[in-house]
Image: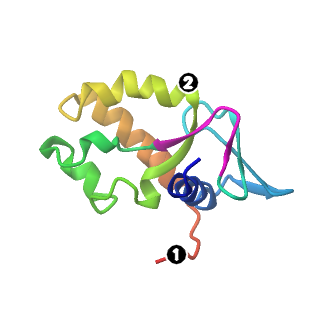
């Protein structure tokens, strides 16, 4: 796995208040379905763990998503916008809510709810500059 992607996985797991580091493995739960997920302490995802952009990357720059995107400073890779999800949930979101786009009221509602969950699971850490 590329080093940049490992850094994003670490950023997501280190700022997840539900994540616990035990024997060099971070243990947490899917943002959507709460399935168990693991990430090694070097950022390598294990099993069916994927990196989730809560507000879809494709929505950035879209006028209809401006309010959601501004919550993370218009940066799709902001730590607040990164979460861990199981493969199934992440791919299903990409086929449904992400694909509908920010012009769809239901998609906005689902993404807003997911973002609120992410913030509720937020843990402050000293992030690298």
Q: Which mark is residue 88?
A: 2
Relative to 76, say whether 37 is above or below. above
Q: Dot 2, crowdedness within 10 Å: few (<14), some or many (≥20)?
A: some
Left of 97 or right of it: where is 51?
right
Residue 87 in the image, given as x and y percentages of width and height: 57, 29
Residue placed at 40% from the left, 60% from the top? 78
Left of 101 or right of it: where is 37?
right
Residue placed at 61% from the left, 37% from the top? 30
Q: Count of labels shown?
A: 2
Residue placed at 17% from the left, 32% from the top? 103
Instruction: Name the residue tied to disc 1.
Output: 128
Residue 9 in the image, given as x and y percentages of width and height: 57, 52
Mark earlier in primary sequence (2, 1):
2
Q: In the structure shown, which secondary structural element does the residue marked by tag 1 occupy?
A: loop
Q: Which mark is residue 50?
A: none
Residue 124 in the image, given as x and y percentages of width and height: 56, 69
* Image colouring: rainbow
Left of 64 or right of it: where is 68?
right
Read off the magenta span.
44-52
């Amino acid at each position: 796995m590329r080093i940049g992607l490992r850094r994003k996985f670490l950023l997501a797991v280190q700022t997840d208040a539900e994540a616990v580091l035990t024997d060099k493995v971070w243990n947490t739960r899917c943002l959507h379905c709460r399935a168990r997920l693991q990430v090694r302490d070097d950022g390598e995802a294990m099993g069916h763990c994927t990196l989730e952009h809560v507000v879809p990357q494709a929505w950035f720059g879209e006028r209809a998503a401006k309010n959601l995107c501004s919550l993370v400073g218009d940066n799709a890779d902001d730590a607040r916008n990164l979460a861990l999800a199981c493969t199934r949930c992440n791919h299903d979101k990409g086929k449904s809510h992400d694909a509908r786009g920010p012009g769809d009221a239901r998609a906005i509602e689902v993404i807003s709810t997911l973002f609120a969950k992410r913030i509720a699971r937020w843990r402050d850490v000293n992030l690298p500059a």
